[in-house]
């Protein structure tokens, strides 16, 4: 999607990063927060400003239709750190279904957004990595200010992208402790590669660790996974069994288009966030190949998307109360309106 910043071999770069990681051991945080890692004093951090970029500081930031959209049941999702597991576990099926009209999408730890409006406790942002006809600048929505920072990310030639559904963010210690889980598709700057781990910098400037087995380390500007038809499908299969979540775009829960958007994201391919927009872009195809997207409509309006896996088979996130599943392409056949291709 974007050109690589450096063309040196990845093996050489990894070796250099390991040395850097050893020489840049951060000073401890304040003793009262119980974790290691350097973080800038609050007084030195820039403030959020309209028209300026900001970065997500929680595992998953949900974008709300308005500041009044969240309910009491949504309080864990508004916290810092966001308590996504608690939020999802505490909702009934009816409460999950009622997210429709309240929440629209999600952004991941480290994702860049642009602030377009501020009010007490809240920021209206657009997400450039999620194209949408709702706003040419990116998908719009409201996020609690506490879940954003105006501080620019650490400079690094490499990134670590999470490729498990979720991964534990760990303290920066030889025997690290668990902090909280972060999502598939999360990208963070790399500053070191100790045995079995990757040292990363969070948007708030804190050095943390991730298990090496949970991530792909790659050059900045390059995809975590080189795009191929088999990789698109095998990546989608990682989500089999994951509960559907309206507005979900993370390893904690996905909606139909959140699944396809997230799969393409780790392959460096930017597609629109919503199914209706995905159905208007890419190339129309009648003979499908693995990884192509299939669309479904009611009364002329596209409402659903699935990924073609093989003749007679597709993967999709069907709806609230269900899980990501592989099903026959005959499913929803009466509503099928065509397919699009985003990879040659």
Image (cartoon, helix red, strand yellow):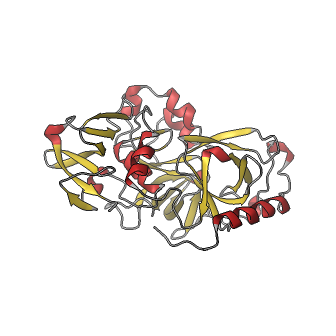
In front: 247, or 210? 210
In the image: residue 95, left or right of residue 214: left
Quadrant containing the N terminus in the rendered view: bottom left
In the image: residue 299, left or right of residue 76: left
Residue at the spot x=41%, y=67% of the render?
137
Q: Is residue 183 above or below residue 43?
A: above
Residue at the spot x=78%, y=41% of the render?
176
Quadrant containing the C terminus in the rendered view: bottom left
Residue at the spot x=39%, y=31% of the render?
323
Q: Is residue 113 above or below residue 101?
A: below
Q: Is residue 66 visible in the rendered structure shown here?
A: no
How many numbered callouts? Answer: 0
Percent x, y for residue 52? 54, 70
Percent x, y for residue 58? 60, 48
Q: Is residue 101 visible in the rendered structure shown here?
A: yes
In front: 1, or 272? 1
In the image: residue 113, left or right of residue 325: right
């Amino acid at each position: 999607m974007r050109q690589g910043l450096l063309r040196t071999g990845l093996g050489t770069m990894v070796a250099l990063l390991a040395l850097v990681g050893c020489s840049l051991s951060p000073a401890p945080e304040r003793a009262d927060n119980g974790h290691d890692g350097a973080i800038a004093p609050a007084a030195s951090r820039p403030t959020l400003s309209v028209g300026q970029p900001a970065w997500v500081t929680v595992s998953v930031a949900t974008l709300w239709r308005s500041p009044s959209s969240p309910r009491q049941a949504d309080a864990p999702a508004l916290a810092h750190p966001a308590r996504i597991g608690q939020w999802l576990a505490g909702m009934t099926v009816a409460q999950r279904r009622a997210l429709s009209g309240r929440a629209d999408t999600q952004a991941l730890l480290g994702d860049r957004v642009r602030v377009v409006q501020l009010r007490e406790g809240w920021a209206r942002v657009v997400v450039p990595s999620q194209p949408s006809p709702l706003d040419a600048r990116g998908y719009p929505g409201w996020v609690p200010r506490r879940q954003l920072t105006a501080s620019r990310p650490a400079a690094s030639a490499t990134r670590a992208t999470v490729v498990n559904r979720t991964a534990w963010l760990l303290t920066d210690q030889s025997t690290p402790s668990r902090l909280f889980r972060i999502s598939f598709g999360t990208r963070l700057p790399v500053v070191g590669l100790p045995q079995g781990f990757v040292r990363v910098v969070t948007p708030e400037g804190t050095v943390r660790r991730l298990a090496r087995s949970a991530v792909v380390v790659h050059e900045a500007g390059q995809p975590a996974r080189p795009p191929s038809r088999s990789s698109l499908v095998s990546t989608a299969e990682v989500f089999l069994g994951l509960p559907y979540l309206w507005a979900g775009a993370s390893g904690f829960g996905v909606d139909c288009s959140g699944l396809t958007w997230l799969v393409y994201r780790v392959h460096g391919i930017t597609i629109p966030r919503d199914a209706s927009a995905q159905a208007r872009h890419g190339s129309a195809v009648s003979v499908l190949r693995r990884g192509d997207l299939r669309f479904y409509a009611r009364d002329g309006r596209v409402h659903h998307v699935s990924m073609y896996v093989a003749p007679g088979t597709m993967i999709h996130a069907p709806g609230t109360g269900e899980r990501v599943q592989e099903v026959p392409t005959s499913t929803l056949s009466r509503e099928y309106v065509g397919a699009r291709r985003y990879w040659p």
